[in-house]
């Protein structure tokens, strides 16, 4: 069993991005700039946002964090997004999810300019990605692809099973891996909460690659996988003890895997790295750089 180390891969990608930023700065351009909006106080969101700001420092990007209280009205938030959409000094904008219940998440996602939508959640980017066109790809799914590529894991022609169909992970990764992309051309089965247990097991037991994003600690057990499987664990679950675990019963399942991601230090790191790639792309688009 070998570890798909998200930290090693993310550090390497961010170092390459930092080199590019130096080249652009040497030719007189400003630095890429990511803006993050954080609403309310939600400890996991605080740590995700912090990771993004630290990654911006490592890539030599500018970053801005805009905080709003939990009680902010939806129209006030939308107005601020509109201002940032029109601000030529910001390349990429993230509104950290989840948002308070009184704010319609989809309205907020739809309000972000598709040109600044580095999370890749806007329908325009999701649609283009689905059609195989150039787009900001949803960051966690894109990060998983970059991790598989970094470790030269064969994907073309492989049987891949995705567990979970969220708009931010399961759905986009199933589309991306089945598309005719550089990192793609797999045969993908997308499973979800309504997938009968027997069908789920039939699929996972013959999968070459499993990607699990359900948010249930220990969901994937050794009897669900074949020997040699590549296992990507997207889950981030905090146990009562405070320990952070994924969706895989890691100690038992890892022995059967050829490759597996750890939690923490796996997909989470890659999500941030993918945001950096997307921000650089937004910046390059702004300045008509290759
Ligand atoms: P979600 O929480 O929105 O939905 C869970 C999904 O799991 C649903 O699609 C549901 O159909 C499926 N599911 C639930 N029970 C199931 C079952 N018994 N069989 C099959 N499918 C089942 O999904 P999400 O937002 O993708 O989050 C999933 C996990 O991934 C969470 O732990 C979340 O914290 C984590 N996450 C991690 C990252 C990262 O960067 N590492 C990014 C996003 C989400």
Image (cartoon, grey):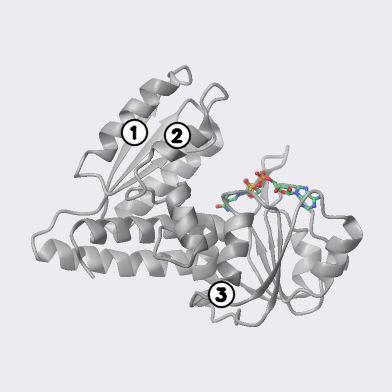
Q: Dot 1 surroundings within 10 Å: few (below 14), some, or many (20 or more)?
A: many
* 254 displayed left or right of 185: right
- Residue located at (55% from left, 64% from top): 144
Instruction: Give the mark nearest the N terminus, 3 or 1.
Output: 1
Determine the secondary structure under disc 3. loop
Q: Dot 2 surroundings within 10 Å: few (below 14), some, or many (20 or more)?
A: some
Determine the secondary structure under disc 1. helix
Frontmost residue, 185 versus 232? 185
Residue 53: % across, % down: 36, 46
In three-dimensional space, the C-alpha distance between marks 3 and 2, rounded to whole angstroms, equals 30 Å
- Residue located at (72% from left, 77% from top): 208
Q: Do the residues bearing badges 3 and 2 touch, measured as CB atoms within 8 Å?
A: no
* Residue at image mark 3: 184
Instruction: Give the mark nearest the N terminus, 3 or 2.
Output: 2
Determine the secondary structure under disc 2. helix
* Residue at image mark 2: 108
Above or below, 205 relative to 30:
below
Q: Do the residues bearing badges 2 and 1 touch, measured as CB atoms within 8 Å?
A: yes
For label 3, being within 8 Å of ligand 1 is answered no
Quarter of the image containing the N terminus? bottom right
Q: Kindly indicate the quadrant of the structure image that contains residue 60.
A: bottom left
- Residue located at (84% from left, 66% from top): 224
In three-dimensional space, the C-alpha distance between marks 2 and 1, rounded to whole angstroms, equals 8 Å
Q: Dot 3 surroundings within 10 Å: few (below 14), some, or many (20 or more)?
A: many
Residue 189: % across, % down: 72, 66
Residue 174: % across, % down: 63, 63
- Residue at the right extreme? 198
Tell me, for residue 81, which label it has, or none. Answer: 1
Above or below, 96 relative to 26:
above
């Amino acid at each position: 069993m070998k570890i798909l180390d998200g930290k090693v891969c993310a550090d390497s990608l961010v170092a390459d991005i930092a080199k590019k930023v130096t080249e652009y700065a040497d030719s007189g351009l400003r630095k890429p700039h990511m803006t993050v909006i954080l609403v309310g106080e939600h400890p996991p969101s605080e740590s995700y946002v912090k990771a993004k700001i630290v990654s911006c420092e490592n890539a030599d990007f500018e970053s801005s964090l805009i905080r709003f209280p939990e009680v902010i009205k939806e129209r006030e938030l939308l107005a601020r997004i509109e201002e940032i959409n029109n601000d030529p000094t910001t390349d990429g904008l993230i509104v950290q999810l989840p948002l308070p219940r009184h704010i319609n998440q989809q309205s907020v996602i739809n309000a972000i300019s598709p040109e600044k939508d580095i999370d890749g959640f806007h329908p325009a980017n999701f649609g283009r990605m689905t059609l195989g066109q150039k787009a900001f790809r949803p960051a966690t799914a894109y990060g998983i692809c970059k991790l598989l590529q970094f470790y030269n894991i064969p994907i073309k022609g492989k049987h891949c099973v995705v567990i979970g169909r969220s708009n931010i992970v399961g759905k986009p990764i199933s589309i991306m891996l089945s598309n005719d992309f550089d990192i793609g051309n797999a045969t993908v089965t997308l499973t979800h909460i309504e997938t009968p247990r027997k069908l789920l097991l039939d699929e996972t037991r013959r999968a070459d690659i499993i990607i699990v994003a359900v948010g249930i600690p220990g969901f994937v057990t050794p009897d669900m996988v074949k020997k040699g499987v590549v296992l990507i664990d997207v889950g981030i679950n905090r146990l009562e003890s405070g320990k952070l675990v994924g969706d895989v019963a890691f100690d038992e399942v890892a022995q059967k895997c050829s490759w597996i991601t750890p939690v923490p230090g796996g997909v989470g790191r890659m999500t941030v790295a993918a945001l950096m790639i997307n921000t650089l792309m937004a910046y390059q688009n702004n300045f008509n750089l290759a």
